[in-house]
Image (cartoon, coloured by chain):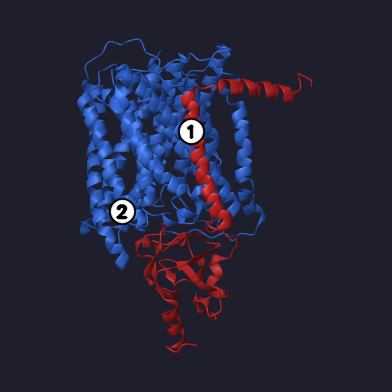
């Protein structure tokens, strides 16, 4: 190969670089150990992402925040827990995030079932988080946020806004009640099992 | 060598930095008190959010930028042994920065810019706030240019020689800052300024967040590099030993420069506008950038061990006791590394992709960055001030004992304040609330931690006051000290190849990585349909 070609030059430069890296025994061991530690963590997260589908909520879907109230899926009469059949795998919840609350302010959902939240902001940035759970997403005006989770434990949870959205930010929260599947079904049917 | 121009430039920059720091600590104290709800008469969201915005801007933008500029000028002249290139330009940059700070401070203090230091639109601040912030960045570019030119001039005058480590790291930081600040500068010039001046009605929020995320991560390395310079160049000497490995130090700085940049999306894990693949890629980079910090921890601790053994320390841990704990630089390094370990652990939790959902935007996050920034970084800034003040003023340090007390109280205060925040974060408390108003059983568990953080705040405010007092007393009443010949903080004796002695290949590598990491994520806002909101007040 031509010794003046850029490949040869890069090669010899790289050789010099590697020569430079002839570092002490201890340093080398630490370098390997540190790289292995980091690699281990990345592998664990990759397994979670690829096989268990543990990914953060990402969802490109835009919407005009200024006209949410005029119709479409975020119109007032369409909000809240969506009607479902007992055979449905996923239950959908639609919420509008706006100063200062998530509307409707109170929702009731079943435990141990996939709940898909679809949320849109009417005004500014908001963040939705149910403490002690992994239900968390940012809500940007102009975008629809979608996040799916399962609540294993029945109980009453606050749904908090965790992004500064104005002077009333402290007051921005709503109530999420998680019922066992039987209680939730009873609620829907007025106490009669279907 | 250190001439009058350098001394003045350094001192003028440092006083703005540390004056802002002390003022920001007062705001911080108000915030922990207000937030706890202990004193009802000071409760006010309007004052709280104005205070939080000012505290953030002063600490993250003013303290850091001015300190780094002053320290850069000092490092360049002392380690290269040459005067500052174009002092007029340096003073002009100082003037532009200062004008920016004043312009931004007015609306901030009047409560007209309560948009937090991350200024996420569409909440809109007074236009002067954005103009001021932009000028601060533009003024800092004067410094960036001077550092890069001085690096080049020295290399030209010393062909084949190795650039001294402190200047190598400072130049790495200058390049890092040029890359880093481009994101927020684009946001300011093309989005925030025209929108706040009324030239444009709407703003693309997703694009603004993406550009800010570009800046938001590497900026912490811009703040961190001076602390690492101290750890590599001053600490081993102060401890009575030598640096374990000069080469490994250079590699660490280069790794920070290259991997620190293309990883900003770990701030956007919970955002809808960026996709899974981009987030995953940025996650891998985020883990990669912890490598230089792990190397730094090893090299600095190894250097300390060498020094401790040289001083007669025996056994597995005996060298720790043999270290000169009465030396502020050594004490600061030990406390700083301790906080780095704890804060680094929290950082790995933040970085862990989907797990971020548990703590995103909770009190855990300020807990983490107060440990890393206010703990690790600022502690080293304080120690550098104690090291440099006598050299800059020609006076002896006012009191070594007071300096040690100050460093210890800063550490203890930070530990008391950040521990409750980590717990509160795990219990789900949002980071940016001004008071707890939720009528929910869960939030009752927050109360005791809210009270504990007041104690931390008090200790920290006292410590910050003591720090400024020591500097002031040193400058005004310190005993004159005969000017000794300036000891250069560790000259390079090792010969390194061109790879570790210039930045061209590394800048090209960064360009490639930035295109890969931010190409489509930014382009998508121009290709896909977005609906941009108008401005909102608060």
In the depicted structure, whether residue B334 falls above or below residue A131 = above
| Neighbourhood count class around disc 1 (C-alpha, 10 Å): few under 14, some 14–19, many 20 upward | many
Q: Which chain carries label 1?
A: B
Badge 2 element: helix
In the figure, the shade used to draw chain B is blue
In the depicted structure, whether residue B431 falls above or below residue B264 = below
From this viewpoint, which residue is outermost toward the front? Answer: B315
Q: Which of the pair B494/B105 is nearer the observer?
A: B494
- Disc 2 from disc 1: Cα separation: 40 Å
As drawn, the chain in red is A
Q: Which residue is identified by label 2?
A: B47
Location of residue A135 in the rendering, given as x and y in whole percent from the top left corner: 46, 63
From this viewpoint, which residue is outermost toward the right? Answer: A1
| Left or right position of B487 against A14 | left
In which quarter of the view is residue A164 placed? Answer: bottom left
Location of residue B496 in the rendering, given as x and y in whole percent from the top left corner: 55, 18
What mark, if any, has residue B292 been given in the picture? 1
Q: Which residue is drawn at 46% across and 82% down?
A: A185
In the depicted structure, whether residue B240 falls above or below residue B286 = above
Q: Mark 2 lies on which chain?
A: B
């Amino acid at each position: 190969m031509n010794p003046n070609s850029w490949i040869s030059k890069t090669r010899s430069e790289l050789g010099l670089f590697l020569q430079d890296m002839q570092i002490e025994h201890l340093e080398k061991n630490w370098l390997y150990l540190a790289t292995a530690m980091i690699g281990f963590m990345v592998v664990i997260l990759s397994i979670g992402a690829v096989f268990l589908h543990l990914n953060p909520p990402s969802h490109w879907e835009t919407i005009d925040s200024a006209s949410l109230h005029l119709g479409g899926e975020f119109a007032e009469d369409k909000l809240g827990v969506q009607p479902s059949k007992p055979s449905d795998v996923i239950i959908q919840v639609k919420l509008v995030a706006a100063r200062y609350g998530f509307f409707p302010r109170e929702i009731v959902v079943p435990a141990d079932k996939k709940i898909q939240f679809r949320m849109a902001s009417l005004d500014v940035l908001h963040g939705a988080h149910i403490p002690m759970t992994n239900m968390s997403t940012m809500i940007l005006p102009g975008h629809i946020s979608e996040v799916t989770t399962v609540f294993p434990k029945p109980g009453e949870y606050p749904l908090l806004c965790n992004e500064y959205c104005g002077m009333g930010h402290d007051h921005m929260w709503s109530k999420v009640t998680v019922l066992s599947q039987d209680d939730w079904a009873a609620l829907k049917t007025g106490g009669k099992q279907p | 060598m250190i001439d009058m121009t350098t001394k003045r430039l350094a001192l003028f920059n440092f006083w703005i930095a540390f004056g802002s720091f002390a003022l920001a600590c007062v705001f911080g104290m108000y915030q922990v008190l207000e937030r706890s709800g202990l004193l009802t008469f000071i409760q006010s969201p309007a004052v709280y959010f104005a205070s939080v915005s000012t505290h953030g801007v002063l600490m993250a933008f003013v303290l850091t930028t001015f300190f780094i500029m002053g320290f850069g000028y000092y490092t360049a002249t002392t380690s290269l042994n040459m005067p500052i290139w174009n002092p007029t330009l340096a003073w002009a940059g100082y003037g532009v920065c200062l004008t920016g700070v004043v312009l931004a401070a007015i609306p901030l203090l009047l409560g007209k810019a309560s948009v937090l230091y991350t200024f996420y639109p569409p909440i809109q601040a007074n236009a002067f706030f954005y103009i001021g912030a932009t000028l601060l960045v533009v003024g800092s570019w004067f410094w960036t240019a001077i550092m890069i030119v001085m690096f080049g001039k020295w290399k030209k005058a010393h062909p084949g020689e190795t650039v001294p480590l402190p200047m190598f790291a400072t130049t790495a930081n200058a390049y890092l800052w040029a890359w880093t600040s481009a994101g927020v500068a684009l946001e300011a010039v093309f989005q925030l300024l025209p929108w706040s001046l009324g030239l444009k009605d709407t703003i693309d929020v997703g694009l603004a967040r993406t550009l800010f995320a570009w800046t938001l991560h590497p900026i912490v390395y811009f703040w961190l590099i001076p602390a690492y310079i101290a750890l590599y160049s001053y600490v081993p000497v102060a401890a009575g030993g030598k640096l374990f490995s000069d080469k490994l130090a250079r590699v660490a700085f280069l790794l920070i420069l290259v991997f620190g940049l293309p990883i900003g999306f770990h701030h956007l894990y919970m955002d809808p506008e960026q996709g899974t693949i981009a987030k995953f890629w940025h996650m891998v980079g985020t883990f990669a950038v912890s490598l230089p910090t792990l190397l730094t921890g090893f090299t600095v601790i190894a250097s300390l061990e060498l020094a401790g053994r040289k001083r007669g320390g025996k056994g597995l841990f005996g060298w720790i006791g043999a270290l000169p704990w009465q030396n502020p630089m050594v004490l600061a390094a030990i406390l700083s590394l301790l906080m780095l370990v704890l804060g680094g652990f929290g950082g790995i939790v933040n970085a862990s992709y989907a797990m971020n959902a548990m703590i995103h935007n909770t009190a855990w996050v300020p807990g983490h960055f107060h440990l890393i920034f206010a703990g690790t970084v600022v502690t080293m800034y304080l120690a550098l001030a104690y090291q440099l003040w006598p050299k800059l003023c020609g006076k002896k340090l006012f009191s070594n004992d007071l300096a040690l007390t100050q460093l210890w109280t800063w550490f203890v205060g930070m530990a008391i304040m950040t521990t409750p925040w980590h717990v509160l974060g795990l219990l789900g408390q949002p980071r940016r609330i001004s008071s707890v108003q939720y009528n929910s059983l869960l939030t009752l568990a927050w109360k005791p931690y809210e009270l504990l953080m007041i104690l931390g705040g008090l200790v920290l405010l006292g410590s910050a006051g003591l720090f400024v007092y020591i500097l002031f007393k040193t400058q005004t009443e310190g005993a004159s000290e005969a000017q000794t010949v300036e000891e250069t903080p560790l000259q390079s004796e090792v010969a390194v190849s061109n790879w570790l002695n210039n930045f061209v290949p590394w800048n090209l590598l960064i360009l490639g990585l930035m295109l890969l990491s931010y190409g489509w994520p930014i382009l998508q806002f121009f290709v896909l349909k977005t609906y941009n909101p108008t401005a909102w007040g608060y």
